[in-house]
Structure formats: structure tokens, C-alpha cells
Image: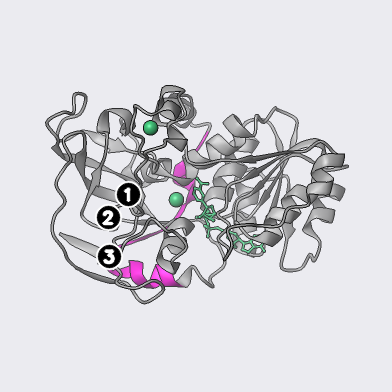
Amino acid sequence: MRAVVFERFGEPAEVREVADPAPAPHGVVVRVAATGLCRSDWHGWRGHDPDIALPHVPGHELAGVVEAVGDRVAGWRPGDRVTVPFVCACGTCAACAAGDQQVCERQTQPGFTHWGSFAEYVALDHADVNLVPVPEGMSYATAASLGCRFATAYRAVVQQGRLAAGEWVAVHGCGGVGLSAVMIAAASGARVVAVDVSARALELAHAFGAAECVDASRTPDTAAAVLDLTGGGAHLSLDALGSPATCAASVAGLRRRGRHVQVGLLPSADGTTPVPMGRAVALELELLGSHGMAAHTYPPMLELVRAGVLRPDRLVTSTIGLEAVPAALAAMGTAPGAGVTVVEP
Ligand SMILES: NC(=O)c1ccc[n+]([C@@H]2O[C@H](COP(=O)([O-])OP(=O)(O)OC[C@H]3O[C@@H](n4cnc5c(N)ncnc54)[C@H](O)[C@@H]3O)[C@@H](O)[C@H]2O)c1
Ligand SMILES: [Zn+2]
Ligand SMILES: [Zn+2]
């Protein structure tokens, strides 16, 4: 099959022929129809993920058609249209038994723990635990974002963030995760402040329901802007970029007893990030993490998509082929955000 491969972290990837994957006994191989380019792919390529072994094929936000099925898989057949949470759970550890497959103790992740979906085919583990049927009428390009960023944003806003109608939400970083969060929060009846350095990203955030937009390239203190616009601070705030500055600004823009959800990855040499904990104590803030979303919690989100309340299709601003992925991956280091790029292998 053709796949995007890199041999060294941070050095140009290339498209070339590699061996086709085979399904594990509990797994499937999916023919990739659409796969989103997520900033986590860029983190992986830069060497921020210790799970990645070289040479490597990235890609983890996907939808496609089941091609081959392991002999212990009960619920899936070749030809089924599927997507998958990028955290593929084992189904049997203590976290899985508690329903928390998104933090499975023995999770695998395509594009991180093994070769991913910037390829014609990808192997997925524990298919009976992890695969999600793509609803009839939904395109693969739309369904791909349900594999990572749209679902992750849904969990961050709804499940971890416990957003209520009428609350103020701040979203720092309006790329794939952030724009999804803006759309989901606005559809939940919240008032959203979108923060980004890119005018195009803020335009999209406004179109997806943000009540206020803050241009971080021209606003030195974005937390002060959020405190001002929300009349005392956001009830819920997301760092949907992942940087010490956006993390701190998210916490600093909360009101009393507000909730911060960290979605953006925060790679650092020693694995730590400074957080204004004095404010967390004095204002009784909640600091939460969010990591993907378990397959069994997809139905309410899919129902909102089916009803047209949530429109992940509107996030897709660009569609490219495999050969354009190496340059697109490298460009994520510098280019400002402008919606979601989907790869159609
Ligand atoms: N926790 C999880 O399960 C999970 C899942 C998916 C992605 N992620 C992580 O979420 C983060 C976002 O991913 P993405 O694919 O949406 O990224 P993206 O590149 O699409 O979007 C990032 C956005 O941040 C904006 N930005 C840059 N600097 C900024 C600043 N100083 N202030 C405000 N905005 C700024 C960019 O213009 C862009 O719009 C990444 O760290 C990714 O690895 C985590
Ligand atoms: Zn992702
Ligand atoms: Zn598990």
C-alpha cells in the first residue's frame, strides 16, 4: 500500500510503498477513506510522543470501510462503514470495566503506538470495543473528525466540562479541536468567547456561533479580555492549543469555581507546565484533563449530528491527497489555523 512514512523526527516525511497491515485476531484492517490532519500528528512527527518507533506512519483521525476482520471479532464484517476513537481500548482493564475506555490501561493508538491512517489501510485493535458505525448519509470526510478532534471537543465541553446553557465558555485556540468546541458549546446554549491569533480562525469561530472573538495576535493579555467580555470570567475554559501561555490564560480567565479543561498537548523537556495554582486555590477552580472519548459514549453526539444541531462537515476547509501530507505536516509548525484539513488516500 501507499503510506506517508518518516524515518527521523522532524525530517521530511515521504509517500512510498510499504507492506499492507494484517488484522490482529481481535482487530480489523480498515481501508482509509478520509483521515484528518490533527496537531497531535505534528507533535508525533516532532518527536514529542515517546510511544512512536521509527520508521513511522502517522494519522489517527479516520473513517473508512472494514477490509479484513480477525477471527475473534464478532460484530463487524468487511464492507462496514466505520470510524474509531483514536484511543483504542482493550475492553478488559479496570478503566475499561469502569466505562473509561478513553484512559484504558492497555490502549493502542493508530499513528502513535503503531502505524496509522496516512495510508491506504490501517490496523485497528479490539474492534468489538472500539469501532463506531458511520451513520447512513454521513460522508467519510465528516466522519473522520469523529475519530479525534470533534469527539474530543465533545467530551471536553459536555462530559468533562459539564457545560450548562447560559454559561460563558472561553476557547483558547480555534483549530480543529477549538472550532469543534465552539460549535458544540454554542449549540448547548452557552455564550462563547473564541481566542486565536488567526483572523481566519476567528471568522470561522464566529460563523460557528462564538458571541465574542479575541485576536491574541493584537491582545497581549487575553485572560483580561475574557474576564472583561464575560463580566467576571468564564464558567468553563479550554486550552485547545496546548502551550504554557494558553494554558495559563485559560486558567486566569475563569470566574470563581470555574472549570478549566486542558485538551492541547503540553510537551516540555521535564514533562511539566506551570499553572497559576494560587488562583485555583483562592477561586476554587477545577482543573481537568480530557483525552479522546470512549466509543460507547458516541450515540448522543451522533444523534445531534444526525439532527443537524452539530455540523462537523462545516469544519472541513481543505481536502488533500497523501502526496500533500508531508508538506502539510511540516507547515503546522508555523501556519496559523484555518479549519480542518482532511486527507483522502
Ligand atoms: N487531549 C486530546 O485527546 C487531544 C485530541 C486531539 C488533539 N489534541 C491536541 O489539541 C491541540 C489542538 O489540536 P488541533 O488539531 O485542533 O490544532 P490546530 O493546529 O488545528 O489549531 C490550533 C489553533 O491554535 C491557534 N493558536 C496558535 N497560537 C495561539 C495563541 N497564542 N493563542 C491562541 N490561539 C493560538 C492556531 O492559529 C490554530 O487555530 C493540539 O495540542 C493537539 O495535539 C488533544
Ligand atoms: Zn488528533
Ligand atoms: Zn482497557
Q: Earlier in the sequence, mark 1 or mark 3?
A: 3
Q: Which image quadrant for residue 168?
A: top right
Q: Image point 47% across, 40% down: which residue?
A: 292
Tell me if residue 315 is in the magenta stretch: yes
- Above or below for 116 versus 143: below
Of residue 289 and residue 167, the one placed in the foreground of this image is 289
Rendering coords of residue 180 (x, y %)? 54, 44
Instruction: Kindly report which numbered mark, 1 or 3, lies closer to the viewer in this rendering.
Output: 1
Q: Main secondary structure of the magenta part?
A: helix
**What is the secondary structure assignment of the residue under circle 2?**
loop
> Which amino acid is tagged 1?
Pro
Q: Is mark 2 within 8 Å of ligand 2?
A: no
- Above or below for 56 versus 331: above
Quadrant containing the N terminus is bottom left
Q: Earlier in the sequence, mark 2 or mark 3?
A: 3
Rendering coords of residue 245 (x, y %)? 70, 61
Residue 4, label in figure: 3
Of residue 334 and residue 304, the one placed in the foreground of this image is 334
Ligand 1 is found in the corner quadrant, namely bottom right
Tell me if residue 263 is in the magenta stretch: no
| Pointer 2 with pointer 1, Cβ within 8 A | yes
Q: CA distance from mark 2 to mark 3?
A: 10 Å
Q: Image point 13% across, 54% down: which residue?
A: 20
> Which amino acid is tagged 2?
Trp
Q: Is residue 274 visible?
A: yes
Residue topped by disc 1: 110
